[in-house]
Image (cartoon, helix red, strand yellow):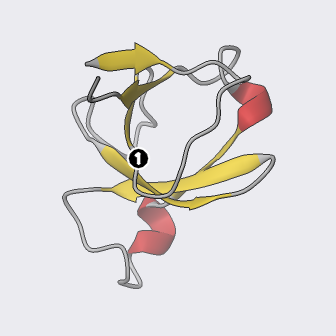
């Protein structure tokens, strides 16, 4: 089930997310996987592509927790 992510919640490496207001470089139905999680931000890349190629410089996104709910709307997949 998809659940909205608030700035008080944290993500973990391997989590699946999607943007409610996706960046214009990606399609609206693109799913992302968290590839790095830090205290103040997390990094995602599209699941449909390999995240280790040079082209991923343009497709990787860094999301600051502070921006969640204000500038960025994100949903996280929850298996429960």
Which residue shows up at 66% across the image and 24% down it? 68
Q: How many marks?
A: 1
The N terminus sits in image quarter: top left
Picture coordinates of residue 53 (x, y %)?
Answer: 35, 84
- Depicted 34 relative to depicted 69: above or below: below
Which residue shows up at 25% across the image and 40% down it? 30
What residue is pinned by disc 1? 15
Picture coordinates of residue 46 (x, y %)?
Answer: 32, 55
Crowd class of label 1 (few under 14; some 14 to 19; many from 20; radius 10 Å) = some
Picture coordinates of residue 79 (x, y %)?
Answer: 26, 29
The C terminus sits in image quarter: top left
Which residue shows up at 26% across the image and 37% down it? 27
Picture coordinates of residue 72 (x, y %)?
Answer: 60, 24
- Depicted 1 relative to depicted 53: above or below: above
Task: Look at the numbered disc 1 and give the secondary structure of its residue.
Answer: loop
- Depicted 55 relative to depicted 31: above or below: below
Q: In front: 2, or 27?
A: 2
Instruction: Locate residue 60 relative to residue 55 in the image: left or right.
Output: right
- Res. 48 image quadrant: bottom left
């Amino acid at each position: 089930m998809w659940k909205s992510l608030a700035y008080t919640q944290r993500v973990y490496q391997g989590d699946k997310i999607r943007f409610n207001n996706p960046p214009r470089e990606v399609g609206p139905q693109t799913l992302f996987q968290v590839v790095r999680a830090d205290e103040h931000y997390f990094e995602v890349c599209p699941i449909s592509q390999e995240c280790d190629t040079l082209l991923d410089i343009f497709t990787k996104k860094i999301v600051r927790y502070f921006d969640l709910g204000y500038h960025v709307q994100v949903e996280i997949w929850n298996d429960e």
